Amino acid sequence: MAFEGEASELGIAAIGAGLAVGLTGIGAGMGEKDVGAAAVGAMTEDRSIFGTAMIFMVIPETIVIFGLVVAIIILFVL
């Protein structure tokens, strides 16, 4: 049975972990929107840049992975 203080600390840590993943997801989505629009526009003019465009599409997604790592650290350090 957890004491009141321990349950409160775990709840705050869970909120922090959720914010870490959620806000990085929103930020990556906003960044990927702009990159994706530019990549599709560029690929309509020159199809040979498909690989480069895909690499640029993956870069914002790494931010979400960093947010997930921070969330795991927050939950397991406590």
Image (cartoon, helix red, strand yellow):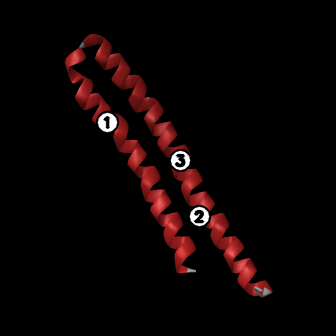
Name the residue located 62 percent from the left edge and 59 percent from the top edge.
18
**Residue extending furthest toward the front:** 1
Q: How far from the left and from the top, in percent, is residue 47? A: 24, 15
How far separated are the C-alphas under marks 1 and 2?
A: 27 Å
Residue 54 lies left or right of residue 9; in this view the side is: left
How far separated are the C-alphas under marks 3 and 1?
A: 17 Å
Name the residue located 35 percent from the left edge and 43 percent from the top edge.
59
Q: Amino acid at mark 3?
A: Gly
> Are there few (<14), some (14-19), or many (20+) residues within 10 Å of tag 1?
some
Residue 28's mark? none
Q: How far from the left and from the top, in percent, is residue 41? A: 36, 17
Name the residue located 53 percent from the left edge and 47 percent from the top edge.
25
34 and 52: which is toward the camera: 52
Asked if marks 1 and 2 touch (Cβ < 8 Å), the reply is no
Could you tell me which secondary element the residue under label 1 belongs to? helix
Residue 25's mark? 3
Q: Amino acid at mark 1?
A: Phe
N-terminal of the pair, mark 3 or mark 1, is 3
Residue 47 lies left or right of residue 17; in this view the side is: left
N-terminal of the pair, mark 1 or mark 2, is 2
Name the residue located 31 percent from the left edge and 36 percent from the top edge.
56
Q: How far from the left and from the top, in percent, is residue 49? A: 22, 23
27 and 53: which is toward the camera: 53
Residue 56's mark? 1
Q: Which residue is mark 2?
A: 17
How far separated are the C-alphas under marks 2 and 3?
A: 12 Å
